Image (spheres, helix red, strand yellow):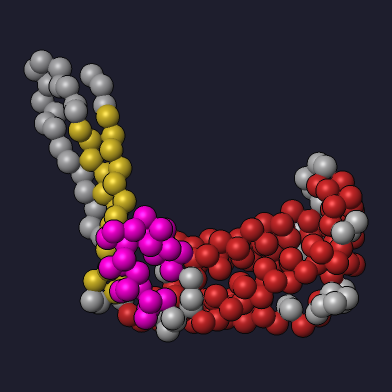
């Protein structure tokens, strides 16, 4: 007897909130002769996030964006303040083999250029999350930055590894739930982008980042 599983994931937007429907079914089951087990289809009711839950996620998004915005103050260009000290600390205490070589020979060797890139990336995270515009793109960028911080600083002396772990988890949460579609600009742009997505693949991709 062979079993074939098919899992379908659908995201549905309703008037009363965001519904994420997870359903799985067993199909193409060849039952042995005399078997009493009937073919069945298993489904789960969609989990619906109401307006209050979505508003709460929007507040989490704004708080997370404010955190990134605040961290820009101590590494302002053109000198980028104390950023070099943190990168040097990462190079000394990273737990990933070879990462210290990359930091030393690439980042620190071209500090002004890459420091500018880091500052701009963190500014983009802050803007996208604070204003809820292309929120999932900002969350993805925050995830990449947070993973880099975790790799470099989680086990450095005086650092608390859960700090960077929670940054990673917050970014993953905001990638999973489109928090910019409440109290954000994404809520205003989404209807237009959804209409454009009917004829444009690029628009469909842009919709995912909102």
- In the image, residue 67 sits, relative to residue 206, either above or below, namely below
Q: How many numbered marks have been drawn onto this rendered protein structure?
A: 0
Can residue 48 be seen from the camera position used here?
Answer: no
Magenta region includes residue 203? yes
Residue at the image point whose x is 90% and y is 56% from the top: 109
For the record, the magenta segment spans 186-210
Q: Which quarter of the rendered picture does the C terminus lie within?
A: bottom left
In this rendering, would 67 be left or right of 151?
Answer: left
The residue positioned farthest toward the top in the image shown: 33
- In the image, residue 138 sits, relative to residue 54, either above or below, namely above
- In the image, residue 88 sits, relative to residue 119, either above or below, namely above
Residue at the image point whose x is 49% and y is 66% from the top: 136
Nearer to me, 160 or 14: 14
Residue at the image point whose x is 46% and y is 64% from the top: 209
Residue 131: x and y in percent read 51, 82
In this rendering, would 193 be left or right of 44?
Answer: right
Magenta region includes residue 197? yes
The residue positioned farthest toward the front in the image shown: 199
Residue 207: x and y in percent read 39, 64
Q: Which quarter of the rendered picture does the N terminus lie within?
A: top left
Can residue 197 be seen from the camera position used here?
Answer: yes
Residue 16: x and y in percent read 25, 77
Nearer to me, 186 or 192: 192
Q: Quadrant of residue 159?
A: bottom right
Q: Quadrant of residue 139?
A: bottom right
Residue at the image point whose x is 34% and y is 58% from the top: 200
In this rendering, would 185 be left or right of 109?
Answer: left
- In the image, residue 170 sits, relative to residue 45, either above or below, namely below
Q: Main secondary structure of the magenta part?
A: helix
Residue 41: x and y in percent read 17, 41
């Amino acid at each position: 007897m062979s079993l074939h599983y098919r899992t379908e994931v659908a995201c549905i937007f309703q008037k009363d909130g965001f519904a994420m429907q997870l359903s799985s079914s067993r199909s193409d089951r060849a039952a042995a002769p005399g078997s009493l087990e009937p073919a069945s289809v298993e489904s789960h009711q969609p989990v619906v996030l109401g307006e209050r839950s979505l508003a709460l996620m929007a507040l989490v998004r704004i708080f997370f964006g404010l955190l990134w915005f605040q961290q820009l103050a101590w590494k302002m260009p053109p000198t980028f303040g104390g950023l070099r000290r943190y990168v040097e600390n990462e190079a000394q205490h990273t737990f990933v083999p070879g990462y210290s070589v990359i930091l030393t020979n690439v980042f620190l060797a071209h500090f002004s250029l890459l420091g500018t890139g880091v500052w701009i990336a963190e500014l983009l995270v802050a803007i996208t999350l604070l204003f809820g515009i292309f929120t999932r793109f900002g969350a993805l960028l925050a995830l990449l930055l947070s993973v880099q911080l975790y790799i470099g600083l989680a086990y450095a002396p005086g650092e608390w590894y859960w700090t960077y772990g929670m940054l990673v988890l917050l970014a993953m949460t905001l990638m999973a739930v489109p928090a910019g579609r409440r109290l954000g600009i994404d809520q205003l742009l989404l209807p237009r982008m959804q209409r454009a997505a009917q004829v444009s693949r690029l628009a469909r991709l842009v919709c995912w980042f909102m």
